[in-house]
Each structure stands twice: as structure tokens, then as C-alpha cells.
Image (spheres, coloured by chain):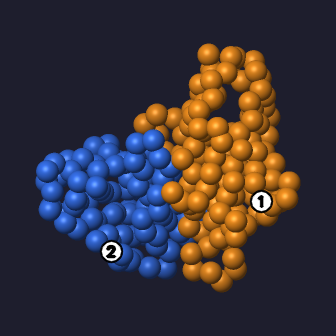
């Protein structure tokens, strides 16, 4: 649970394009995952969550995909907007109540 | 504004001093978490309360750190004999935690208290 990590530390996309942010986790016992967005000077903000018994969940402009076989999580943001620029974290929860966060990916949207 | 308040927003202290931070969670939330975040890193779990009971603590948490939630509402985090390595953002989060509620694990974070130890 303490090896949650992200493949890319930074990502730049053109406004209107789709963004994909990836996350690898190491603990196959993790049963719940959350994506957070953190803007400068603020605390993390919930985006979307997914339980381990699902492989896909959609929200407003966001989709989370979970591949338990390879312990991989991704966040897809459709039609990326300048307001989406932030650091994105994935977090996993094991059987208790401790959440483990990855290092984060910094998303920059180019107007 | 998530509804979770932290005070103070910034704290500068000298090494060896004690500091105390306060967190006021969303009123109907019974779960409360403390995290520490350093620059360029994700939040690191420190401790977790269910109502007034401190149920989990990180095994990495120094005994200089103590947290309380005496009435199951607000919480305080105290760091004794601060060290320069304690400099970080301290985040508090609350979650509904109601059994059967789908969103019971979704944590709402405050803006944090930034600690600088000189």
C-alpha cells in the first residue's frame, strides 16, 4: 500500500484534448481507490472513486479505469479545460482506513 | 470551500518549540484524518479518528506527535519539540463514515496548516 506511484510526473495537453493520467499500485489487497485534484494552496479535492469490484466508473467529464490484473489505475479527463490544470493524485485504501497517496502528476492545460 | 476548516493557515516556530493545530470537520462527519504533505509529494497518512476514538496511527508517526478529538467534533494535532524535518503542510480531512452510505469513504480536505520550523 505504500508503493502507490504515478508513471509521469508532468503532463501537458492542449485545451479541448483528452487527458489520461496513470497510476500504479502495489497492494492487491486494496479495495477502494480515489482520484484527487489539488490546486496550488488548497487541499486535495475529490474527483471520482472506484471500488475493486468494478473496472470502470464515469463521472462528469471524467472516467476512472481499474485494471486489477496489472494493478493499474487511470483517470481520463474529456475535453480538458484550463481549470483542470492542477496536480492529480491517486489514493488507495487497504482493508483498514489508511489511505496511501501517490506522488502526483502535474497537469498543465495549454490554451 | 469544502467545509473543513484548519487553523492556523501558517505557523512559523523555532526548533524545540511545541505547536498545536486545530481542525473543524464537516459537522455530520464522524471520520477525521490527519495527513502530512511535503513539497512534490502526496499526502502521507498520520492518524484516523472514528468519532472521538483514535483508531489508527501510522507506524511511522513519531511519539512527539499526538492528536485528540475529545468530543468527536474538532480535532487537534500537537507536535512537541519540533524539528526542522517537521516542516510541511498538515492536512485534515473528514468523511461521512455512515454505514451503508455509498460515499462514506470520500474525504473532504481542509486547506491545511503550513508549518515552518526554523
Instruction: Say which chain is blue.
Output: A
Q: Where does the C terminus of chain B fall, quadrant-wise?
A: top right
Q: Mark 2 lies on which chain?
A: A
Instruction: Say which chain is orange.
Output: B
Please indicate, yes or no, whether residue B33 appears anywhere in the rendered image: yes
> Which residue lies at the image location 47% right of the left edge and 62% below the top edge?
A46
> For residue A29, which quarter of the picture?
bottom right
Q: Is mark 2 on a helix, strand or loop?
A: loop
Q: Tell which of B29 and A23 is nearer to you.
A: B29
Q: Tell which of B64 and A23 is nearer to you.
A: B64
Q: Tell which of A67 and B44 is nearer to you.
A: B44
> Which residue lies at the image location 62% right of the left edge and 51% below the top edge?
B5
Residue behind mark 1 = B73
The image position of residue A73, as x and y in percent, is: 38, 63
Pick out the residue farthest to the bottom.
B100
Q: In this view, does B65 lie above or below A84?
A: above
Residue behind mark 2 = A60
2 or 1: mark nearer the eye: 1
- Within 10 Å of the Cα at label 1, are there few (<14), some (14-19), or many (20+) other Cα atoms? some
Please indicate, yes or no, whether residue A65 appears anywhere in the rendered image: no
Amino acid at each position: 500500500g505504500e508503493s502507490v506511484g504515478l508513471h509521469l510526473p508532468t503532463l501537458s495537453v492542449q485545451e479541448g484534448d483528452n487527458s489520461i493520467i496513470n497510476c500504479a499500485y502495489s497492494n492487491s489487497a486494496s479495495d477502494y481507490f480515489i482520484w484527487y485534484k489539488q490546486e496550488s494552496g488548497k487541499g486535495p479535492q475529490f474527483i471520482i472513486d472506484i471500488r475493486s469490484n468494478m473496472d470502470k466508473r464515469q463521472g462528469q467529464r471524467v472516467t476512472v479505469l481499474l485494471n486489477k490484473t496489472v494493478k493499474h489505475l487511470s483517470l481520463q479527463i474529456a475535453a480538458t479545460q484550463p481549470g483542470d490544470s492542477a496536480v492529480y493524485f491517486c489514493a488507495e485504501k487497504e482493508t483498514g482506513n489508511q489511505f496511501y497517496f501517490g506522488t502526483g502528476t502535474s497537469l498543465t492545460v495549454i490554451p | 470551500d469544502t467545509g473543513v476548516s484548519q487553523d492556523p493557515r501558517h505557523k512559523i516556530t523555532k526548533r524545540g518549540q511545541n505547536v498545536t493545530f486545530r481542525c473543524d470537520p464537516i459537522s455530520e462527519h464522524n471520520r477525521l484524518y490527519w495527513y502530512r504533505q511535503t513539497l512534490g509529494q502526496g499526502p502521507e497518512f498520520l492518524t484516523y479518528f472514528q468519532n472521538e476514538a483514535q483508531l489508527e496511527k501510522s507506524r511511522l508517526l513519531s511519539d512527539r506527535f499526538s492528536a485528540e478529538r475529545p468530543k468527536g467534533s474538532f480535532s487537534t494535532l500537537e507536535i512537541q519539540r519540533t524539528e526542522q524535518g517537521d516542516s510541511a503542510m498538515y492536512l485534515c480531512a473528514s468523511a461521512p463514515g455512515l454505514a451503508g452510505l455509498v460515499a462514506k469513504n470520500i474525504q473532504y480536505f481542509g486547506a491545511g496548516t503550513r508549518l515552518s520550523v526554523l
